[in-house]
Amino acid sequence: MAPVARVVPELAGIVLVAVLLVQTSSLTTRAGGPGPAFFPRVVLVLLAVGLVVSIYQRLRPAAPSPGTTEEPLATEESTEWSATISWPRFWVGAVITVGYVVGASQVGWIPATAVFLVVFLRAAGVRRWWLTIPVSIAVTVGLAYVFLAVVYVSLPTGVGVMDELNTHFLDVVGIY
Amino acid sequence: MDVLTGALDALFHFDLEMWLVLVVGVITGMVVGVLPGLTFVMGVLLLLPLTYGMDTDSGVVLMMAVYVAGTYGGAITALVFRIPGEPNDVPLLWDGYTMTRKGRGAEALGWAAVSAFVGGLVAWLTLAFLAEPAAQVALKFGQPEYFWIVLLGLTSVLLLVDRAATATMVSLGIGMVVAMVGVDPVYGTVRFAFDNETLRSGIDYVPVMVGIYALGHVLARFGERFAAEEIPDEPGRVRTTLPTLGELRRRSGSLARGSLVGSLLGVVPGAGAAVASFVAYGTEKQFGKDRANVGTGSPNGVVAPQAASTATVGGAFVSLLVLGIPGNAATAVILGALMLHDVQPGPQIFTTQPELVSTLVVALLMSVVLMALMGLVAARPMIALLKAPEAVVAAAIVVFAYLGAYAMRNSLADVWVMLAFGFLGFFMERRGYPLAPMVLGAILCPLAERFFVTAMISSGGDPTVFVGRPLSVGLAAVWGVAVLLLLRRWVQQRGSRPPGVGVGTTTGQPLNNEKESAC
């Protein structure tokens, strides 16, 4: 791997820090004191220093010399982790989770959660449809009851026709 | 004395609902402590949405009970199966599991239960007897003193890590930058919003925590196919043998040292149960009466870390209630819950919310008692929980993470923030950046900035305001010592330390690892 490729996230971080530093120039005030830009500048400069040191550590030769100051950044745990993680599987989990968040805002929390639970469990290797589907629905309705009727926390009901359908459903099952 | 009288009064006024909340909290804490995929921080986070509809007392008591019991639950599986449920249970493996292998498992479980109980009692004593005097002192603090305390907290995050100090600094910095997004609390200027309404209203640290602790963890475990250690089919007969009074007397030094270490480190932002547990183990190995046997199955190797883990609760709550500064992630979530209920912790809380303080004092004691009882009678059912399919637990975590982020402000934007930080946390951890400093940075930065800026404004821009009184000079000196210690360690490491050997504890165990570090 090219050396620069090994430090892309840190380089991106430095670019972002630079953008934010430039932004601080527009932060002005007539009130006294150090102003709204002072603290962000201090933190951003320290963050930039940290990122530069981090890049140096990642680019230096892999075998540390006796005078090395710090361990390589990847800990034993993360090294082990990277060896065992399945990227396709990770992205499946990520897509399902993002789909749940998007779905809950569009079709409402109740249908999105029921579908999410079934799909997530299936993707995670739970094969018993006859069990996961009714349990997912029951758990979703149960949680909806707890949050809407007991704790009085509102949940997204979706947009358009789904909003009406969800409200009607909650009315029918006696939660509203 | 007022706090004690109030606590006694609160105990007599505990209704059925409060007892139920306590029992549910302790059971939840034990369960999340036992399950390796769930930490007590996650337990407190996932219960957060349930507390929105509760009254303040019940909500905070629920979280406190989870926190207390969570420092102990994982000890059972660590001792019986060598499966640490929590990061702070790792030191228990070295002596505790060795005891089990030598046929002294019942004894090890007994020592863990007693140590958690004693550590919990010390935590209670700390909260009951030291919080109010500490608040009297804190009432004398001005903005400069508070600034030094918060700066000390930020510095201690760096001081407590052993390896990868640069990664910790970057993580801390990212958290601080995140906290600066939105309207500046002093000047009212909008910062780093890029004309985005979501960013303009600021990034609350609760969805950030839910994302990195709950969602990031689920994504990682999903990618790992929920691979776990093999759990034996039949745990066999799980027994707990309590030590005799004579044995307790012989180990009283370890109990005292562990409890003291836990109480002190509980106050320090960035420390928490895991760091306290490792430090207590190291202290025992270096200074304990039985130090020659620590590491080979000595009960002292169980007593000190377990007592320290549970004792941290007292210090953490003193810091939270007296200064309004959370010492770790669990108390950070509790701070969030308090603020959602319009309760502002600080030295005045003892006069503005005396009933709440009394309720917390007595709830801590009751949580400790219930936790110890649960540990004695429910060890076997707790172990059976290890058979729960992790995929189901993970699915529940995602659903509760969604609810936790959304229900706080009924905002879908917070859910997106949670999602974004779930991914950010996952990738940061993969690159070796610890996550706990990011959370602490996000929590402590707004405080540091507010105290610094208001002190400067009130002094007309004169920086000597930060060393203008003996109190602030003393705190500045403490901060200076912390910086000197940091520099000294940096120079020492540069000169001599071979890679792979930790200096954070005398056992050579790393403290910087996310699973073993702050929060």
Image: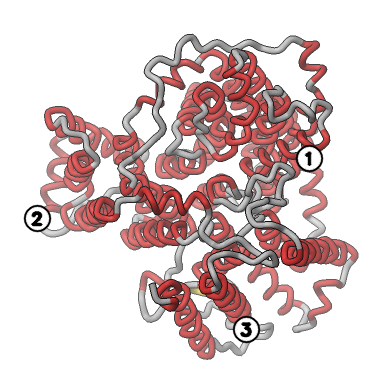
> Residue tagged by mark 1?
B130
Q: Residue, x 79% and y 29% (percent of image)?
A: B292
Q: Are marks 1 and 2 on the same chain?
A: no
- Please tell me if label 2 and label 3 are on a single chain: yes
Q: Is residue B86 above or below residue B483?
A: above
* Disc 1 and disc 2 in contact, CB within 8 angstroms: no
Please provide percent x and percent y for residue B199: 40, 72
Label 3 neighbourhood size at 10 Å, few (<14), some (14-19), many (20+)? some
B184 shown above or below B280: below
Image x and y of residue B395, in percent: 30, 41
Whole-number angstrom distance, CA of label 1 to CA of label 2: 58 Å
**Residue B190 visible in the shown view:** no
Viewer-proximal residue among B491 and B237: B491
Eye-nearest disc, 1 or 2: 1
Q: Quadrant of residue B479?
A: bottom right
Display coloring:
secondary structure
- In the picture of the structure, the residue carrying the numbered disc 3 is A35
Q: Nearer the viewer, mark 2 or mark 3?
A: 3
The residue sitting at 16% across, 28% down in the picture is A131
Residue at 79 percent of width and 64 percent of height: B488
Tell me the SS state at disc 1: helix
The answer for which chain carries disc 1 is: B
